[in-house]
């Protein structure tokens, strides 16, 4: 697979142990996290708490690989604290684990491919990563049978629905964040992306295509699980027929179809059902950014702005951030005793007990602040 992307050498990490939850924690950010978590709660967010999460039960999804066109299956398993999102691929009768981290990006040509040191790959991770980060799931083991996450309908929605069906379980450990401390920017060929300090997680994503079907579109919003689910999760990937035909001729993107791609040809959308959002294109780019930035390994406290961006640019900005030790720090949400009794405005199938504990924590957090 061609690779125009510079593989990240991991330089700049503060300590190797960071991948498993390590050192150099900045404790002086209670106020920032307090307002962020409390704001997410009061805005009707389904789930974002001070504690780490996993899924309540295993989830199997079957579909087709957008590259291979072959049937592929994944099984998401609940996972322990500080284990993060990991892929498990069976290779030569051995289970190889690949951490969902930008350190392991192998290629970004058509989709995001992660690879282990021994060269075992897992492709098309971005929409699943977006769903997991979008719903604020910290720890999951993703078993994968055929090297590729199924494309499903080209959006994150099938993953979101499956996770909601299984439910979310809160774990007894504080959620860790990466806090952006200073602006980090990458600019290339008229495209740019920039991470900025922000007390929460915010996206400002703008695209500009010549075809009037897309044109110039901008999506700006703070992102929490409720907003992710309602405003971004259903936005599908898109492509131009001329490009797709070239890829097909080269034996690639064999699974791409109108069932999983918004296809544009000659200034028209070919999908008979039309668009899911009037600006579905930029929303999909925002969804991709959520998934790409999830390869930091932890939720980010930042604002991310991009203009005509994509997977490669998003990854470069993230890698530039992580390579600059002065540009970020870890922040742990403080662990808090349960005190208050607050109703959680949600229909998400979060474990009720865990949900109450998480909310109480957030409420206590806020009470401390005020
Ligand atoms: Zn995408």
Image (cartoon, helix red, strand yellow):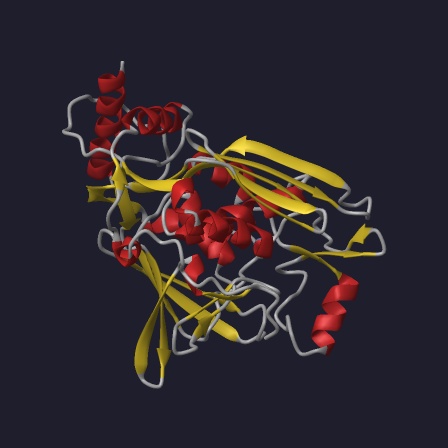
Q: Position of residue 274 (x, y in %)?
A: 71, 48
Name the outermost residue toward the top.
370
The residue located at (75%, 72%) in the rendering is: 246
Of the pair 67 and 83, the residue shown nearer to us? 83
Q: Quadrant of residue 61?
A: bottom left
Would you say 344 lies left or right of 205 here?
left
| Residue occupying image coordinates x 72% and y 66% | 244
Q: State the residue lying farthest toward the bottom.
A: 92
For the point 71% across and 51% down, the residue is 189
Q: Is residue 230 above or below residue 155?
A: above
The reply to whether residue 276 is visible in this rendering is no
Q: Is residue 186 left or right of 105 when viewed as pictured? A: right
> In which quadrant of the rendered image does the C terminus lie?
top left
Where, quadrant-wise, is the N terminus in this rendering? Answer: bottom right
Give the quarter of the image for residue 279.
top right
- Give percent across and percent down for residue 326: 40, 41
**Rendered view: 24 above or below 103:** above
In the image, residue 328 lies at what x, y percent? 39, 41
Task: Tell how many labels.
Answer: 0
State the image coordinates of residue 337 (x, y, percent, origin top left). Answer: 14, 29
């Amino acid at each position: 697979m061609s690779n125009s992307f510079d593989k990240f050498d991991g330089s700049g990490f503060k300590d190797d142990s960071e991948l498993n939850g390590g050192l150099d924690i900045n404790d002086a950010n209670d106020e920032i996290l307090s307002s962020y978590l409390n704001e997410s709660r009061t805005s009707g967010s389904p789930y974002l708490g001070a504690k780490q999460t996993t899924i309540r039960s295993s989830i199997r999804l079957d579909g087709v690989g957008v590259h291979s066109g072959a049937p592929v299956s994944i099984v998401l398993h609940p996972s322990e604290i500080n284990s993060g999102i990991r892929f498990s691929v069976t290779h030569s009768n051995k289970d190889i684990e690949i951490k969902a981290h930008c350190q392991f990006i192998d290629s970004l040509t058509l989709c995001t491919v992660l690879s282990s040191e021994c060269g075992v790959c897992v492709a098309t991770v971005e929409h699943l990563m977006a769903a997991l980060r979008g719903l604020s799931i910290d720890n999951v083991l993703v078993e994968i049978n055929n090297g590729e996450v199924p494309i499903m309908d080209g959006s994150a929605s099938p993953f979101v629905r499956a996770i909601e069906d299984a439910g979310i379980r809160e774990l007894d450990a504080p959620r860790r964040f990466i806090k952006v401390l200073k602006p980090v920017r990458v600019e290339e060929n008229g495209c740019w992306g920039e991470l900025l300090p922000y007390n929460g997680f915010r996206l400002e994503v703008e695209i500009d295509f010549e075809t009037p079907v897309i044109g110039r579109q901008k999506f700006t919003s703070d992102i929490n699980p409720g907003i992710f689910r309602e405003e971004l999760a259903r936005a599908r990937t898109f492509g131009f027929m001329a490009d797709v035909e070239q890829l097909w001729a080269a034996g690639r993107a064999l699974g791409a179809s109108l069932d999983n791609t918004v296809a544009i040809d000659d200034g028209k959308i070919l999908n008979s059902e039309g668009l899911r959002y009037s600006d579905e294109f930029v929303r999909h780019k925002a969804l991709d950014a959520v998934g790409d930035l999830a390869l930091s390994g932890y939720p980010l406290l930042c604002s991310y702005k991009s203009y005509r961006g994509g997977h490669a640019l998003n990854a470069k900005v993230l890698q530039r951030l992580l390579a600059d030790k002065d540009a970020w720090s870890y922040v742990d949400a403080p662990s808090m005793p349960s005190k208050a009794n607050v109703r959680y405005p949600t229909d998400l199938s979060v474990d009720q007990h865990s949900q109450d504990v998480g909310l109480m924590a957030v409420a206590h957090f806020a009470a401390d602040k005020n």
